Image: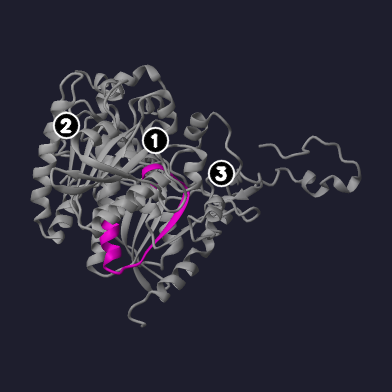
Amino acid sequence: MLQKGLFRKPRIELETYDKFAKTAQPVIPEEMCITCPSCKTTLFVTELSENDNICQKCNHHFRINARQRISIVFDDNTFVELDADMRSTNVIDFPDYDKKLKSASLESAEKDAVVCGTAKVGGYPAATFVMEPYFMMGSMGSIVGEKITRLFEYATEHSLPVIGFTVSGGARMQEGILSLMQMAKTSGAVKRHSDAGNLYITVLTDPTTGGVTASFAMEGDIIIAEPKALIGFAGPRVIEQTIGQKLPAGFQRSEFLLEQGFIDDVVSRDEHKTYLTKLLALHNREAK
Amino acid sequence: MEAYEKVLAARAKGRATGLDFINNIFSDFIEFHGDRRFSDDKAIVAGLATLNDMPVTVIAHEKGHDTKDKVARNFGSAHPEGYRKALRLMKQAEKFHRPIICFIDTTGAYCGLGAEERGQGQAIAENLMEMMTLKTPIISVLIGEGGSGGALALAVADEVWMLENSVYSVISPEGCASILWKDPAKTWEAAECLKLTADDLFGLNVIEKIIPEQKDDFDKTYNILKTELYTTFKKNMSLPTDELTQNRYMRFRKMGVSE
């Protein structure tokens, strides 16, 4: 992208860059740059990733993959993955689903749309599931449902709290009714974990919609969200088509849900670790 | 019959609706209103009734018959308060250990401003979670359209049955065709691919029974349902509640496992 004012004539002599003009090559930073979609500031990729992929200027939260999130939130080298090898199959023979699975796998370097395991936050153990936006937009099929259910069952058995990070376009329609059934299945596992007196915290990230919102995303004892994340049951386009009018600005964003009373707080990504550590400390049974 | 013809049959004008089933299967239906939080959603009717000699809690989507009725009932698309009313009465049924029967007939949970503002996703999620451990028998019957989360929010049951010409799907064939293929003309194909007919779902072990239908005559269907509901409830009422809820969890637990 061209710098603004590149072709503007200097009004005073000081504005001409004599120093640079004399060098044979223009100075090009070795790092890659990216423009913040929210405030249009040009950001260095390395600096951005050091800042947990949050724009330093406007606090825009860039989308990150599951592994990046794990490294941001959990203590170094504490994450142990569970059910790492489970892959979706084309159970109902949906056209082109096999192809889609393959390309999603290549794009995300994951086997399906959720990564599950155990880890520590600030020294406190927890079970965790982290959804993967680059695998078919985190859509929930049978494997996502099965992995999350198994994680809750594991956490119930070991009396561990669950921290879940959601990002999803909803149920995966290529698996038909079976993907819908995962909503009930995961909800059942959440309920059993809850009834056994265990803590479940959900962190909603952009976007969390459809069948995931209408199941385990909204079932946490404590629900927080990243700033300005889109969170809703129906997508904005579907609502606009249904009601035949434009949605007001900020509708279905985290701050709106906070106002409506559906989430406990909006917490920036760089504060997740401290925030979650505090919550786990307050619920730590051994300390009591 | 092709899949999309089933969809059309399930949506057909003049097809029996939730209230028709209630009035023809049970006696003494007393309707109860409201979620005690916001309002009364007419897209879902609920109350007490008697099945032979058995007091039961009945909950049903109601699409309405004439235009005025349909509009008042939002064509059977419930808002969060509808699902919250359903849950309130299910909890009541649990307290008095009455069986619960849900009749499902909805295009889907409503997608509108108010629905989102009042937490459509949260309302459905809560139903799924609470119904799973409800200590009383539940049977859900799909009588027309079973539209995604809006249908599932009344279908976490010990057994789920479908009428011969009902459908149950994660998304409407129209929605699927337009999202996946950006082509509304592919609706027929989408209906086929989604595997949404009673036969398909029986084959996938998602439902326990298919209730036969006779063209334009639901009396036989009502009678079959009456007998089937009564015998199944009798059987399930005698089960210890722990076993009942364990079976319900396992019913869903085994769905969609590849190994």
Q: Is residue A202 magenta?
A: yes
Disc nearest the viewer among 1 and 2: 2
Are there few (<14), some (14-19), or many (20+) residues within 10 Å of tag 3? some
Q: Which residue is mark 2?
A: B222
x%, y% of residue A8?
82, 36
Q: Amino acid at mark 2?
A: Tyr
CB atoms at circles 1 and 2 under 8 Å apart? no
Q: In percent of the image, x 24 and y 63: which residue is there?
A: A154
Task: Name the residue furthest right.
Answer: A12
Marks 1 and 2, how far apart at CA: 24 Å
Horizontally, residue B185 falls left or right of residue A264, namely: left
Q: Amino acid at mark 1?
A: Ser
Front residue (pair A170, B50)? B50
Residue A164's x, y, as percent? 38, 58
Q: Around disc 1, counting alpha carbons within 10 Å, would you say few (fewer than 14), some (14 to 19), or many (20 or more)?
A: many
**Considering the numbered disc 3 on the image, is that residue within a helix, a strand or a loop?**
loop
Kindly identify which chain the residue marked by label 3 belongs to: A
At horizontal 33% and vertical 78% (from top left) the residue drawn is A285
Q: Amino acid at mark 3?
A: Phe
The magenta region covers A189-215
Do we see residue A12 in this rendering?
Answer: yes
* Disc number lying in front (3 or 2): 2
Kindly identify which residue carries mark 1.
Answer: B77
